[in-house]
Image: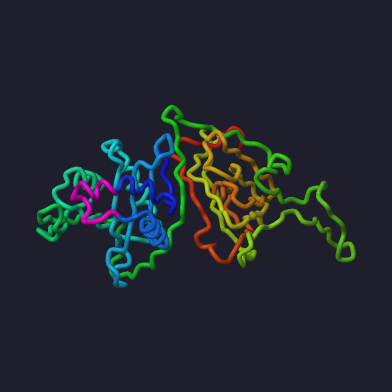
Amino acid sequence: MRIRTAHPDDAKAILAIYAPIVEQTTISFELNVPDEAEMRRRIQATLQLLPWLVGEDDQGAVNGYVYAGRFRERAAYQWAVEVTAYVRADCRGQGVGRRLYERLFELLREGGYFQAVAGIALPNAASVGLHEAMGFKPVAHYPAVGYKHGAWRDMGYWQKGLQEPGAGQKPVEPKPLRPFTTVPVHPEIKRYALPVEALSADAFAAFGDVIEASPTAEHYPINAGFAERYNVLARLNTGGDDGQPVLSIFRAKARPLDAEAGLPLSLMERHLLGSQAFMPLGGQRFLVVVATPGAPPTPAQLRCFLAAPGQGVNYGRGTWHHPLLALDADGDFLVIDRAGPGAAGDCEELALDAGTVWVDGRGLR
C-alpha cells in the first residue's frame, strides 16, 4: 500500500468512500453528501495547516483516507487535533486504517502536536476497536446528541497522547506539515542494497550538476593571477514566481556506517519549485542518493553516488534525493536553494519502508 498527501483531485475517489457512509449509516452525522467541489474545498482548507492522507492499493486506487482538523478554534487548543479515518468497504479489516493512522501520528508529532481526539458515533464496534488498538482511551460519552435515520444517536470521544507535554512549559507553536509519499515495497523484497558509484558530471547529468574545480570546467586566472575562477559550475533554478536564491549553512551529523551491513535509508524528498545545491565546507565525503524527477521511484530506480573531498552537487528542480548523508565526521555544508512564495511547503517526502533499502557498505571502505 502506498500512502501520500491528498490532493484536491482526489475528491471524487474520497467521495466514493464517504458518500455511502453518509447515506446508509449513522457513522457520520452529516445528513447530505457534499458535492465534489465542496470536498475539494475541504481538502485544500485542511492542507493549509494539517495533514490529509490517502492510501492507494496495488492498482493505484484510493482505499482509505485520514485527516486531522483543529480540535477547537480558541488559541489555547492549538496543540490538539481531532482525527478522522475512513476505509473503502472492500478493504476494511486489512490494516489500511492502522497504517494510515500510524503515518498521520508521525506527521502530527513532527508538527508539534500533543493530543489527538476522535469522535465516534455509537454504536460502532469496528471504529472503537481500531482507535483503542492505536492507543486511544475513552474520555467522554454524550447520549442522544444527534438525530439521524429516525432516531437519537450517541457520540463518544476517545483521546490519544502523541507526545509528553512539558510540565509548565509553553510549547512551540505547531508548524505546517510538508506533503509526502510513502513508497510501496513488495513483500518479497526484504532488503535492496544500492551499489555505490563514483560521482562524475556525466553519471549525474540526469539529476543535476556536480560542483568541483575540475580541469574540464571552464576556468581562468583572475585577481592579477592570484586566484583561478572555475566558472558556472551549476545553474540555480528558482522557478519564477518571485523566487530568489538564498545561501545557508547546514550543520550535518555524520551518519553511522557499518562497512559490512551498510547504511539504512529512510526517505527521499524533492523540491518542485527550485534547485538545491550542497557543498561541504570541510572537504568531507558524503553520499548522494537520487532518482529522476517524476513519479515516486521504486527502490530499483534509486542510485547512490559517493561525493569525494572537493565535490558538491546541485539537485535539479524536482529531483528526488535523500536528505544529507555526511560520512566520516560532522561538518558544515554550504546550501543554496530557493526562498519566496511557496517555499515553506516546497518539500514532498517519500518515506521508505524501514529496513528495506540500504547503501552497500562494501563501496565505502
| Residue 165, quarter of the rendered image | bottom left
Q: Give the magenta-colored segment's residue range.
A: 19-33
- Choose between 3 and 241: the one closer to the eye: 241
At a point 44% along the width and 51% down the height, the residue shown is: 9
Residue most toward the bottom? 75
At a point 59% along the width and 57% down the height, the residue shown is: 273
Q: Position of residue 278 (x, y in %)?
A: 64, 54
Residue most toward the top? 188
| Residue 146, quarter of the rendered image | bottom left
Q: Is residue 114 left or right of residue 303?
A: left
Q: How is the image coloured?
A: rainbow
Residue most toward the right? 224
Q: Position of residue 247 (x, y in %)?
A: 63, 64
Residue 149 visible in image: yes
Q: Is residue 113 left or right of residue 251?
A: left
Q: Is residue 73 magenta?
A: no
Q: Position of residue 41 (x, y in %)?
A: 39, 60
Q: Quadrant of the N terminus?
A: top left
Q: Quadrant of the C terminus?
A: top right
Question: In the rendered picture of this protein, how many numbered marks are placed on residues?
Answer: 0
- Choose between 262 and 335: the one closer to the eye: 335
At a point 55% along the width and 66% down the height, the residue shown is: 341
Q: Is residue 272 above or below residue 171?
A: above
- For the stretch drawn in magenta, the main secondary structure is loop
At a point 40% along the width and 56% down the height, the residue shown is: 40
Residue 159 visible in image: no
Q: Position of residue 75 (x, y in %)?
A: 32, 72
